Image (cartoon, rainbow, N blue to C red):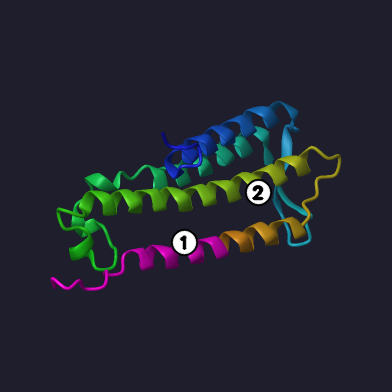
Amino acid sequence: MESVLHPRKLFWVLIAAAALQAAYYFPQLPEVMASRFGADGEVLQTMSRNGFMLIHLGVIAVVAAMFGGIPLEHLPDALIHIPHKAYWLSPERRQESVAYLQDQVFSVCNATLLLLGLIFHWVLQANLRDEPHLDPAYTWVPLMTYIGYVFLWAVRLVRHYELPPPTEAD
């Protein structure tokens, strides 16, 4: 049995968490809320609570559809771009190769959903204050962590699809 941390299951947990986040905060938020903050954390732009929540859930839905909504096993080989494609997508390796790739796509999607959930959380929390303010120090650590994760993810993905060393039969 797959754990909840399996990328495909975690994807659905994160989608549900985003919906719960929106449902939990919606009744607590002011009708007009801060939606954009400057580098110093000061409010630059406001919008309606309804508009903000539509954007919040819309961004989550677009990211989920872009990453999680693509069933790679049904794509033709011409649309799958991996190193040494002829080797990895040969009939005897295709199913395993595409399953690994699909899990990796879900993994980077999950990292993106986590980052977005955290950013939305901070914006929602800022709007619960009398004077909305977003501490700019909050954003750097998660953003740098995300960038580092995506870099390592890409290196690991490319290395996974290297050709194996030749065997004596070759």
The stretch drawn in magenta includes residue 98? no
Q: Residue at x 65, y 49 (%)?
A: 119
Distance between the alpha carbons at the discs numbered 1 and 2: 21 Å
The stretch drawn in magenta includes residue 166? yes
Relative image position of residue 74 (x, y in whole percent): 23, 45
Relative image position of residue 35 (x, y in whole percent): 68, 46
Q: Which residue is mark 1?
A: 153
Relative image position of residue 166 (x, y in whole percent): 21, 73
Q: Residue at x 54, y 38 (%)?
A: 14
Left or right: 117, with 167 as reference point: right
Q: Which residue is mark 2?
A: 119
**Which of 138 and 29 lies nearest the eye of the viewer?**
138
From which residue to which does the magenta span run? 148-170
Residue 6 appears anywhere in the view: yes
Determine which quarter of the picture holds residue 42.
bottom right
Left or right: 83, with 51 as reference point: left
- Of circles 1 and 2, the one toward us is 1
**Which of 75 and 40 lies nearest the eye of the viewer?**
75
- Dot 1 surroundings within 10 Å: few (below 14), some, or many (20 or more)? some
**Which of 163 and 104 lies nearest the eye of the viewer?**
163
Residue 136 appears anywhere in the view: no
* First in residue order: circle 1 vs circle 2: 2
Q: Residue at x 28, y 62 (%)?
A: 81
Q: Dot 2 lies on which element?
A: helix
